Amino acid sequence: MKYAIVVPTYNPGAAWSDWVEAVVGQSVQPEVVIVIDSSSTDGQIGSCEPSAWHIVKIKSAEFDHGGTRNKGFEMAAQHQVDYVVSLTQDSILADQHAIERLLEPFADAQVAAVCGRQLPRADANVRSKFARLFNYLPVSFINLKENIPERGIKTAFMSNSFAAYRLFAFVEVGRFPEKIIFGEDMYLAAKFILAGWKTYYNGEASSVHSHNYSLFEDFRRYFDIGVFHRVTPFLREQFGTASGEGLKFSIKELGYVAKNRFWAIPMVFLEVFTKFVGYKAGYNYKSIPKSIRVKLSLNRKYWKNAR
């Protein structure tokens, strides 16, 4: 299978050498690796990559979750590849067969995209570990339009931290949305499902990727999720809301923390409250002055041209 890798970067830090080493060590090598760097200043980009890799510099202000990746996919298409693997700079491939396994489901010609499993980092706290265990199971499954009544919004689950796309299907449904605050991966997965394509969650292909978010970072992240759901009404109309999944996550998280770090239970209650308030604020962002939205959002650049 001929594939390319596209990764946006910005000040990836010392872990960048681990990212490069993991890609270079893959059992199936890409035709090209396209690094789209938002004018990093930490000196890591360009320091340890193979010379054949393409490093594209853009201004930091030009980064867009969907638009920047579209640029990378367009460049990948020039190398006559059939598939594009999307990674983030902090998603380290777990073993040498990670991409080989990620691409295997494309043997089914109706599979448009594959999402791999994400494992917690060694320094992940108990809440971060649970989030990975809950959202990224070791069991693989297919998502179809027929699954929507049962799985709801989870039918459109996808993460560009470790995913692969069939380039033909990607172009057919209209590429990633541009000028979007968050969730370009879920948006595109939903478009695939509604167009009759399949998506696949592959629990046998893994990367190491997690975050120890502070409460304020949780708030800001869920603020952006709320905005995303508000500006993409077709998701709610076609797939339903995420409220049921959020409740299920919170209940199971409490049980997990009680068993493994019971003294962290108060933090879980604070986290649940923070996420709820952040999401509601984001969903009702139109009632918040733009100057305040910028401070509440992780993606501050989004608000530069947003109404």
Image (cartoon, rainbow, N blue to C red):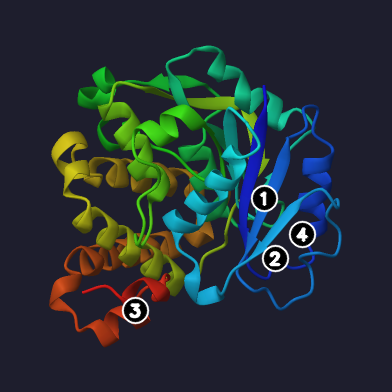
- Mark drawn on residue 242: none
- Mark drawn on residue 34: 1
Q: Label 4 near label 3: C-beta < 8 Å?
A: no
Q: Earlier in the sequence, mark 3 or mark 1?
A: 1
Q: Amino acid at mark 4?
A: Trp
Q: Label 4 near label 2: C-beta < 8 Å?
A: yes
Q: Which residue is mark 4?
A: 16
Q: Amino acid at mark 1?
A: Ile
Determine the residue located farthest toward the bottom in the rendered image: 291
Q: Residues within 10 Å of mark 1 (few under 14, many from 20)?
A: many
Residue 245 visible within the image: yes
Q: Amino acid at mark 2?
A: Pro
Report the residue at 62% width, 27% height from top. 102
Disc 2 element: loop
Report the residue at 70% width, 65% height from top. 12
Q: Which residue is mark 2?
A: 12
Residue 114 visible within the image: no
Task: Decide which of 226, 87 is in the foreground and name it.
Answer: 87
Q: Which residue is mark 3?
A: 304
Left or right of 18, for residue 257: left
Disc 4 element: helix
Q: CA distance from mark 3 to mark 4?
A: 30 Å
Report the residue at 23% width, 46% height from top. 243
Left or right of 6, for residue 149: left
